[in-house]
């Protein structure tokens, strides 16, 4: 019983500190696992997309999106700087830097974008590949 009261007090104190210094509950949050790509372009099937979002990590003034592709050979002509990441209002986030790593069957890409994610409902990702436009909404829950 005493331990439960102790954890309740710690939770209340940390919650009030967070409210005083701003809501930092989204910082360090990782959206992963159940990220579903919702294709907004009816002409292109989601299954034909070569790029998938592995996870999204939110930092204080930026965020990281980790992409993966299961077919690296098809991505040779693709420039990851051409990816546009927008919030639900259509405002584009500024690209800061990119990283990549390869394995024999998968390639991972990480991109860092400047800006706070103020709208936690979704992020939109738009890119062109082989003259086809892909536009996805990723719901953030």
Image: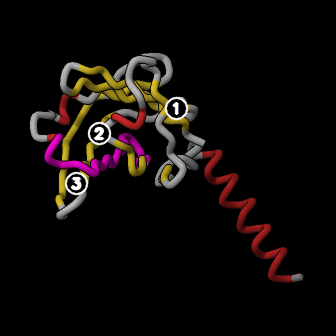
* Residue at image location 18% in from the left, 32% down from the top: 81
Give neighbour class at mark 1: few <14, some 14-19, many 20+ (Cα, 10 Å): some
Quarter of the image with the N terminus is bottom right
Q: Of the numbered discs in the image, which one, if any, rests on residue 122?
A: 1
Name the residue that disc number 3 marks. 107
Front one among 24 and 75: 75
Name the residue that disc number 2 marks. 50
Report the Cα–Cα distance between label 3 and label 2: 11 Å
> Magenta stretch containing residue 61, yes or no?
yes
Q: Are marks 2 and 1 in contact (CB under 8 Å)?
A: no
Element at badge 1? strand
Front one among 57 and 115: 57
Residue 67 position in % (x across, y down): 31, 46
Upstream in sequence: badge 3 or badge 2: 2
Quarter of the image with the C terminus is top right
Residue 126 position in % (x across, y down): 33, 25
**Vertical side of 76 occupied by 84: above or below:** above
- First to last magenta residue range: 58-74
Is 11 positioned to the left or the right of 103 in the image?
A: right
- Extreme residue toward the right, this view: 1
Element at badge 2? loop
* Residue at image location 66% in from the left, 60% down from the top: 14
**Vertical side of 54 occupied by 12: above or below:** below
**Vertical side of 88 occupied by 15: above or below:** below
Residue 29 position in % (x across, y down): 50, 52
Give neighbour class at mark 2: few <14, some 14-19, many 20+ (Cα, 10 Å): some
Residue 56 position in % (x across, y down): 42, 47
**Vertical side of 90 occupied by 105: above or below:** below
> Magenta stretch containing residue 95, yes or no?
no
Nearer the viewer's eye, disc 1 or disc 3?
3
């Amino acid at each position: 019983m005493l331990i439960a009261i102790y954890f309740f007090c710690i939770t209340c104190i940390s919650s009030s500190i967070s409210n005083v210094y701003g809501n930092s509950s989204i910082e360090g949050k990782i959206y992963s696992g159940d990220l579903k790509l919702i294709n907004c372009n009816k002409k292109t099937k989601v299954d034909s997309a070569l790029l998938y979002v592995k996870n999204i990590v939110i930092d204080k003034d930026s965020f990281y999106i980790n992409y993966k592709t299961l077919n690296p050979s098809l991505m040779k002509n693709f420039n990851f700087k051409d990816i546009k990441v927008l919030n639900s209002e259509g405002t584009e986030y500024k690209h800061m830097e990119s990283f990549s790593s390869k394995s024999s069957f998968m390639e991972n890409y990480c991109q860092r974008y400047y800006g706070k994610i103020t709208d936690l409902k979704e992020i939109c990702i738009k890119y062109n590949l082989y003259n086809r436009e892909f536009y996805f909404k990723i719901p953030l829950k």
